[in-house]
Amino acid sequence: MATREERDKYRSVLNDVGEVQWRYGHPPAFDIVNQLFEEGQTKVWPEGSLEETVQNAIKSWEMEFSHKIRLQDFKTINPDKFKLFVNGRDGLSAEETLRLGSYNALLKTSLPEEFQYYKPQEESFESSHDAFRSALPRGFAFEILSVYSGPPVIAFKFRHWGYFEGNFKGHAPTGEMVQFLGLGVLKVDELLRAEEIEIYYDPGELFGGLLKGPPISKTKTTDCGDNTAEKQSCPFTH
């Protein structure tokens, strides 16, 4: 029987035993997004390198905020000191980030509402994750492109990508890759738990891909043609 470590080599915190309360009642499986990562990664870091360590730490951090419901179960952050800063905005505490969900936390914006591609203030944790799971059914892979400094203050460049293969907010899928690049600064304690994370990126890179699909309401729905938009709209397509 495969061990949990064998099932996921990138998120070692999944190997921890104990009374963890999982959001969906059980530990998550990452086989599909791990395959996406391995097929699409542009950097292969040596085992044990700083780059690989940072990459796996952030994968684990994202997993905990998406799948654990109690901060006391987190292994990747210092809950008492944790702050998430995105594009220079005010920092979010661990409690706030957990309540909002990682998508809403990363997509908060100071743009006037009429110019917002996505309105995190109108989304719950569940609705935000549902929207992106629908749009990116194989997941949203993450890789480290460069690490510029070591702990306790780690500066890095990263890439997030996936394939737009499901509906997103009324837009039909294109099947194309969507991605964005960004920079981050991670401050860690002596146990290598995150105390502060600063992320800088352009959300327009992501939404430029997700809004390319034609509005579903304007696609043909009376028969089941071959184009992707029609297939997503047709009630007889499974």
Image: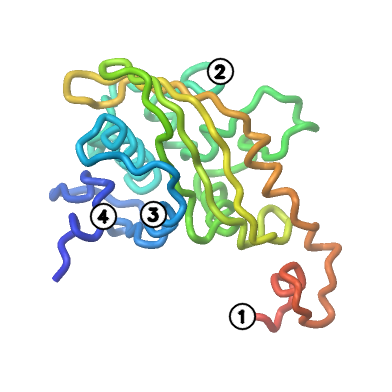
> What residue is pinned by disc 4?
8
> What residue is pinned by disc 2?
89
Residue type at mark 4: give it: Asp
* Secondary element type, mark 3: helix
Rendered image: mark on residue 178: none
Earlier along the polypeptide chain: callout 4 or callout 2? 4
Q: CA distance from mark 4 to mark 2?
A: 33 Å
Q: Nearer the viewer, mark 4 or mark 1?
A: 4
Q: CA distance from mark 4 to mark 1?
A: 30 Å
* Secondary element type, mark 2: loop
Quadrant hosting residue 50: top left
Badge 3: residue crowd in 10 Å (few <14, some 14–19, many ≥20)? few
> What residue is pinned by disc 1?
238
Residue type at mark 2: give it: Arg
Earlier along the polypeptide chain: callout 3 or callout 2? 3
**Residue nearer the viewer, 154 or 11:** 154
Badge 2: residue crowd in 10 Å (few <14, some 14–19, many ≥20)? few
Q: CA distance from mark 2 to mark 1?
A: 42 Å
Residue plotted at (22% across, 48% down)? 20
Earlier along the polypeptide chain: callout 4 or callout 3? 4
Q: Nearer the viewer, mark 4 or mark 2?
A: 4
**Residue nearer the viewer, 70 or 48:** 48
Q: CA distance from mark 4 to mark 3?
A: 12 Å
Total count of labels: 4
Q: Residue 228: image x %, image y %?
A: 72, 69
Relative to 147, say whether 226 is above or below.
below
Q: Marks 2 and 4: in contact by CB < 8 Å?
A: no
**Residue nearer the viewer, 45 or 98:** 45
Relative to 182, say whether 5 is above or below.
below
Residue plotted at (61% across, 48% down)? 178
Residue type at mark 3: give it: Glu
Quadrant hosting residue 6: bottom left
